[in-house]
Amino acid sequence: MRHPKVIIASVGLAVAAAIGGVTATVAAGSPASSPNPASSAPASSAPAADSAAVRTAQALVGGKTETILVDSRGLPLYFYRPDTAMQSLVSGQLAALWPPLTAATPTAAGLSGKLSVVNDAHGSQVAYNGHLLYTFISDRPGQVTGQGVQDFFVATPGIAPVAATSAPAGTAPATPSGGGYGY
């Protein structure tokens, strides 16, 4: 059964793709292992088996240049607003569109927040400041096309930490930097 939000979002994505979508550029010093952007094949949604690198890149988001989180392939990373710090609410067809970032041993490059792993229905899902991370199948390295679609938002280095009931006492939240999407 198809959900109306999925159908509406898919139509919206087709329109965005038809008018060019949104572009991003990888920050200096980041690996330049991007596939040919002219390729019409969808980006692989296969998660890393044992490790994943999370780093930053500059991207145009909502008409404004922002520093966002990207995976080791340069794909923008998103969080799903309804998730909790300990549970992904993304499953089925939604998970097919928004593959979770999974890794047993994720690494961070240039991030001030906390990178962690949550063992959930997706396996070892990577979280940043308690926000479970996802990619979007319509994105390519250097493109942000999923901002605000289906309650997913681009993850930024200054995103406010999610309060978790299992967080150790005395854990101080990271100070958000300007422009973060700390919904």
Image (tube, rainbow, N blue to C red):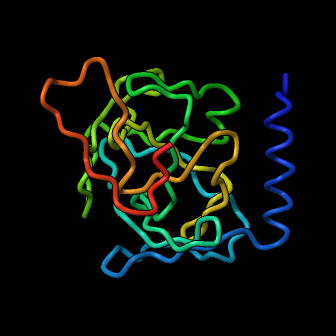
User: Residue 143 occupies which quadrant of the picture?
Assistant: bottom right
User: Residue 99 occupies which quadrant of the picture?
Assistant: top right
Query: For the point 79% across and 45% down, which residue is it?
Result: 9
Most foreground residue, 160 or 17: 160
Q: Is residue 38 above or below residue 67?
A: below
Q: Residue 71: x percent and y percent?
A: 42, 57
**Looking at the image, which residue sits at the far top?**
165
Query: For the point 59% across and 66% down, which residue is it?
Result: 61
Q: Residue 42: x percent and y percent?
A: 67, 58
Q: Residue 46: x percent and y percent?
A: 52, 45
Q: Is residue 34 above or below residue 14?
A: below
**Looking at the image, which residue sits at the far left?**
170
Most foreground residue, 120 or 157: 157
Q: Quadrant of the N terminus?
A: top right
Query: For the point 64% across and 39% down, which residue is it?
Result: 151
Q: Is residue 93 above or below residue 26?
A: above
| Total marks in image | 0
Query: For the point 46% across and 44% down, which residue is it?
Result: 47
* Left or right relative to 14: residue 57: left
